[in-house]
């Protein structure tokens, strides 16, 4: 999925994972910045686009809008 435009708000997940995340941006080297909840905390990470796919569900992640 290298031709996907990773817009802010897009729901994604890791290939082979059920963890759904929300795209919040991209950095200058092409990493995709995502947010997700684990327990009671909001986490943020930078990921290579090659490891992400669009989430199958368009449902919102609780607490992330």
Image: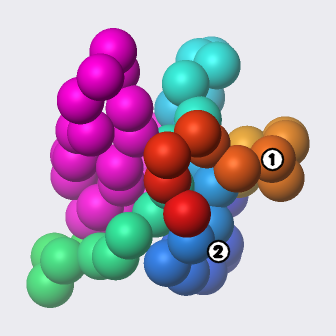
Secondary structure that dominates the magenta span: strand
| x then y, percent, for residue 35 | 35, 49
* Separation (CA) of disc 2 from disc 1: 23 Å
Residue highlighted by disc 1? 59
Task: Specify start and end residues of the magenta stretch as a single range.
Answer: 31-53
* Quadrant of residue 25 within the rendered picture: bottom left
Residue located at (40% from left, 39% from top): 36
Query: From the viewer's perspective, is residue 9 above or below residue 50?
Result: below
Provide the residue designation for mark 2.
3
Q: Is residue 52 visible?
A: no
Q: Residue at x 58, y 39 (%)?
A: 62
Left or right of 42? Residue 16 is right
Between 30 and 36, the one nearer to me in the picture: 36
Write the residue at 29% across / 76% down.
26
Tell whether position 48 is magenta.
Answer: yes
Residue 27: give x, y in percent of width and height: 19, 77
Q: Report x, y in % for residue 15.
A: 59, 29
Horizontal side, residue 49 vs residue 33: left or right = right
Percent position (x, y) of residue 13?
58, 37
Circle 2 or circle 1, nearest the eye = 1
| Residue 59, visible in the rendered structure | yes
């Amino acid at each position: 999925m290298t031709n996907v435009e990773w817009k802010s708000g897009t729901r994604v997940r890791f290939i082979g994972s059920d963890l759904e995340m929300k795209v919040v941006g991209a950095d200058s080297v092409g990493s995709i910045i995502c947010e997700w909840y684990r327990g009671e905390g909001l986490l943020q990470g930078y990921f290579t686009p090659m490891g992400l796919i669009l989430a199958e569900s368009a449902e919102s992640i609780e607490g992330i809008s």
